Image (cartoon, rainbow, N blue to C red):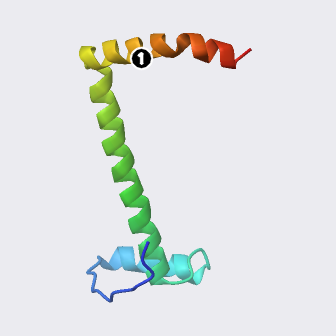
Amino acid sequence: MSARRIRTTVALSADLLHEMDEVVREGRATSRDEFLATAIRNQLTTLRRTTIDADFAQMAGDSAYRREAMEIAEEFAASDWLKTR
């Protein structure tokens, strides 16, 4: 991740800004910038996980994919069994 910082403007409702400032005053965040950056990172992580979960759900419902996965698992079953011994 780049350390380069770009200044931007964000419009927030007064109640969100007040709550964020409370968190900073209480020392649970070092600054508004840090709070917003953390919130954005967390949201991006959630969105990525949601996309991955949706992809896995689609794969689980795909009979051709499941058949291929079973064939691959069967091909490696003997060598996997030997590794556990």
Q: In this rendering, is residue 51 above or below 16?
A: above
- Can residue 19 be seen in this snapshot? no
Q: In this rendering, is residue 50 above or below 31?
A: above
Quarter of image, res 68: top left
Q: Crowding at label 1, few (<14), some or many (≥20) Cα neighbours within 10 Å?
A: few
For the C terminus, which image quadrant? top right
Question: At x 57% / y 10%, what residue is drawn?
Answer: 78
- Can residue 71 be seen in this snapshot? yes
Question: At x 59% / y 15%, what residue is drawn?
Answer: 79
Q: Secondary structure at mark 1?
A: helix
Q: In the image, residue 28 lies at what x, y percent?
A: 59, 74
Q: Is residue 81 left or right of residue 48?
A: right
Query: In the rendered image, which residue does mark 1 sit on?
Result: 72
Q: In the image, residue 35 lies at what x, y percent?
A: 47, 75
Q: How many numbered dots are placed on residues in this image?
A: 1
Q: Nearer the viewer, residue 44 or 15?
A: 44
Q: In the image, residue 24 lies at what x, y percent?
A: 54, 81
Question: At x 45% / y 81%, what residue is drawn?
Answer: 3
The three-letter code of the residue at mark 1 reads Ile
Q: In the image, residue 67 lies at what x, y percent?
A: 32, 12
For the N terminus, which image quadrant? bottom left
Q: Nearer the viewer, residue 6 or 65?
A: 65
Q: Nearer the viewer, residue 10 or 64?
A: 64
Question: At x 33% / y 22%, what residue is drawn?
Answer: 60
The residue sitting at the bottom extreme is 7
